Structure formats: C-alpha cells, structure tokens
Image: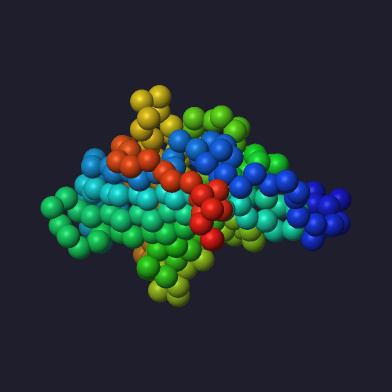
C-alpha cells in the first residue's frame, strides 16, 4: 500500500503563516551567518589538498508551501565562500532547507554553478540538535544530477551533510561528497566543514509580515 492518501489535491486547512514558529530543527539556523575557519579537502591530480575558506550564509524564511495535502516550512539560502584574502568567489550555492512537520522530514536542496544539483533528506526529531541528511546517485527521489563532464571525470555517488546546533547559538556542518574520479579505483571523500556565527537575526517571511509574496 502507498504511504500517501488517494486524495492528492486537498490542501491542509488553517495553515499557520509564520514560518519562523514552524521550522522544527531548522529554527536555530534562520538568519545570516559567517564562518572564518572552514576546511575543504578536495581532489587534485597529485592527491588530496587542504584549503582554508571563509563563508557567508543567508537563510531567509519563506511562506508555507503545499503540494496538495503536503505542507512544508522552509528557509531559502545563499552561500558565498572565498579563500582568505581573495575577492573571487571560491564556491557559490543556492537552495532550500525544508521541514515537513507531518513526517518529521528535513530536506536540503542545492544547486551549484558547476552544473550540479542534489536533494538530501532525513527523518529528524523536531527538537534535534544534530542530524545528517543523505542523497544518493541511484535514488529516484533524494538524488544527485550532474552535467556530462562531471559524470565523466568526477562522478558524485553520494552526498551527506551533518548539522550540529550548539548551545552557544552557533551551528556547524560537515559535508562528505563521495566521488568516483576517473583513473582512480577507490572513492574520494571531498570533505567540507565549518562553524557559523550569527551576524544578523532572521526576519519573518513575507506572508507573516503582510508583504505580498
């Protein structure tokens, strides 16, 4: 039997429009953040190379979203990463963090301007302070898609992100992007990690403030 109802059209009634009050485990992540001690372990022809980085993450609440009976609350995000002391962007990423209260599911969508997208998920307690999301290449739902060159040279087969919410108001992440690199027999673990400090509080989503969405 399907886990879903045969009624795929009827939307929930009495939806609370204040996203900031309904983000579950994502609530502490809302706002604008900076991290100054990022570490990137990336592949190079002569082997793994470590790269320090600094980043800015903007996480803004969006209005509630429905797919028929399905209801999401979420944060739209932008990540800009630079090498220390350099103006040129080292990495840029956009997407959404989504919380589905009915199923206690967290979803992260991501897109990067290398011609790659992914969607990762996990079932998470509403008050969780630590959680890990996973996307896999073979998945028809929470999966990974890349442009032909990346599939040829740097095939991403799995993506994981572990988030830790700290008692001092900071939060951190560790990402593991598992790649099969052309000419190598063993998978390469492209790891990124950082600790984020808040630089600005979040504002309410447009519907909650009366601003047209």
- Name the residue nearer the viewer: 201 or 124: 201
Residue 164 in which image quadrant = top left
Residue 91 in which image quadrant = bottom left
Q: Is residue 193 visible?
A: no
The residue sitting at the bottom extreme is 148
In this picture, residue 37 sits left or right of residue 186: left
For the point 40% across and 63% down, which residue is it?
112
Image position, residue 205 (x, y; %): 51, 50
In this picture, residue 11 sits left or right of residue 175: right
The residue sitting at the top extreme is 167
Relative to residue 127, is residue 93 depicted above or below?
below
Visual colour scheme: rainbow
Image position, residue 24 (x, y; %): 57, 37
- Name the residue nearer the viewer: 69 or 119: 69
Relative to residue 162, is residue 135 depicted above or below?
below
- Name the residue nearer the viewer: 185 or 110: 110
For the point 48% across and 46% down, which residue is it?
204
Image position, residue 63 (x, y; %): 57, 53
Residue 38 in which image quadrant = top left
Image position, residue 135 (x, y; %): 54, 52
Count of numbered circles in the view:
0
Q: Is residue 19 visible?
A: yes
- Name the residue nearer the viewer: 182 or 12: 12
In this picture, residue 129 sits left or right of residue 106: left
For the point 43% across and 54% down, which residue is it?
77
Quadrant assignment for the C terminus? bottom right
The residue sitting at the front extreme is 210
């Amino acid at each position: 039997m399907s886990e879903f109802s045969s009624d795929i059209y009827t939307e929930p009634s009495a939806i609370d429009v204040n996203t900031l009050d309904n983000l579950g485990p994502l609530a502490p992540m809302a706002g604008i953040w900076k991290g100054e001690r990022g570490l990137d372990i990336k592949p190079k022809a002569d082997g793994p190379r470590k790269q320090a980085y600094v980043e800015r993450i903007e996480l803004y609440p969006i209005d509630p979203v429905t797919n028929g009976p399905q209801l999401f609350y979420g944060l739209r995000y932008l990540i800009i990463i630079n090498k220390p002391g350099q103006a040129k962007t080292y990495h840029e990423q956009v997407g959404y963090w989504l919380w589905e209260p009915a199923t206690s599911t967290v979803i992260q969508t991501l897109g990067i301007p290398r011609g790659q997208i992914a969607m990762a998920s996990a079932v998470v307690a509403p008050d969780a302070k630590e959680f890990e999301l996973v996307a896999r290449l073979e998945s028809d739902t929470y999966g990974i898609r890349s442009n032909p060159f990346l599939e040829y040279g740097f095939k991403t087969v799995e993506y994981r992100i572990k988030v830790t919410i700290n008692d001092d108001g900071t939060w951190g992440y560790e990402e593991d992007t598992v790649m099969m690199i052309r000419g190598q027999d063993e998978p390469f673990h492209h790891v990124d990690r950082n600790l984020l400090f808040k630089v600005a509080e979040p504002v309410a989503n447009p519907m909650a403030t009366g601003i047209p969405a």
